[in-house]
Image (cartoon, helix red, strand yellow):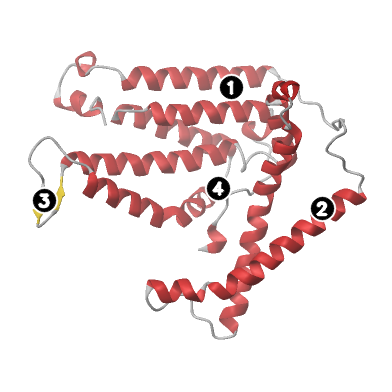
Amino acid sequence: MISDITLGQFFPGFSLLHKLDPRTKLLGAILFIVAIFMAKTPLAFALLTLFTLVLILVSRISVSVILRGIRPVIYILIFTSLLNIFMTKGAGEPLVAFWIVKIYKEGIIRAIFMTLRVILLIVGSSMLLTYTTSPISLTDGLESLLSPLARIGVPVHIFSMMMTIALRFIPTLVEETDKIMNAQKSRGADFASGSLVRRAKALIPILVPLFVSAFKRAEELAVAMECRCYRVDKKRTKLAKLTFRARDFLTLFVFALFLTGVILVSRMPASLLGGSFVARLLCYRI
């Protein structure tokens, strides 16, 4: 399960998403996230799902990589779904009533779409940011977008560098954790059996060497940056200057159009689709 974490990994390629300006992908990710939280009907979620599939096809990232990135959050999705099912109160009669447990139709619907919302959020943002954008490009794009804040004293470059280093070291720490776990297993450690408390205690021997390794890597990185005369208080030049091209403007227009479509579809009355049962189901507000 540890090796399935793909957050922060960059997969080189020559797709349209790879060629886009990093600022375009950052702005597109913001518009996509806003669209996810603005979706209120099944029809809007169907539009989101279709758009996410298009992103996957355009990025040319393997579907197995996408599924591998979702696996680590399965337990979180299950826990969130159960909370929505058991904690959501409905207006009508409960579907299931046992002791103090009552399950309503609204709870099941909310759990389904909450799970779908989290999956789309993970997949869509990963497609636009970490999977198709190198850490250096992501730093340059983030720093360029936040550059107006530097005029009021905000340390934009430091913030951008911190964000990029954090994303860059996620795969490294995941790999280190996997190595430590395999080393512990070869010495007889058991992380899979026993109660939840016992498995949690078994993870303690992993945390100590992991923290030591993380601090050691941080110190090595700091020394390497100092040896290369890196200074945060000096204005730095760029090897490759960021420029918006026609495809970037067209992509931002498509994302803005997509966000507008999601908002309009979420507010669409069922009467526009004929008012039938299927129309009412598609326009049912969550």
Amino acid residing under circle 4 = Ser
Whole-Å distance between the Cαs marked 2 and 4?
A: 35 Å
**First-in-chain label (2 vs 4):** 4
Circles 3 and 2, Cβ within 8 Å, touching? The answer is no
**First-in-chain label (3 vs 4):** 4
Circles 2 and 4, Cβ within 8 Å, touching? The answer is no
Asked if 35 appears above or below 10 in the picture, the reply is: above
Kindly identify which numbered label has been placed on residue 251: 1
Which of the two marks, 2 or 4, is nearer to us in this view?
Answer: 2
Q: Residue at x 59, y 26 (%)?
A: 27
Q: Residue placed farthest to the left in the image? A: 93
**First-in-chain label (3 vs 2):** 3
Report x, y in % for residue 246: 67, 17
Whole-Å distance between the Cαs marked 3 and 4?
A: 41 Å
Report x, y in % for residue 22: 68, 31
Residue position marked by numbered label 3 in the rendering = 96
Q: How many marks?
A: 4
Residue position marked by numbered label 4 in the rendering = 62
Amino acid residing under circle 2 = Ala
Report x, y in % for residue 283: 24, 24
Whole-Å distance between the Cαs marked 2 and 1?
A: 37 Å
Q: Assess disc 2: are there few (<14), some (14-19) or many (≥20) residues with their C-alpha within 10 Å of its C-alpha.
A: few
In the image, is 50 to the left or to the right of 129?
Answer: left
Whole-Å distance between the Cαs marked 3 and 2?
A: 58 Å
**First-in-chain label (3 vs 1):** 3
Q: Residue placed farthest to the front in the image? A: 153
Whole-Å distance between the Cαs marked 1 and 4?
A: 22 Å
Residue position marked by numbered label 2 in the rendering = 222
Amino acid residing under circle 3 = Val
Quadrant hosting residue 178: bottom right
**First-in-chain label (2 vs 1):** 2
Q: Residue at x 59, y 79 (%)?
A: 184
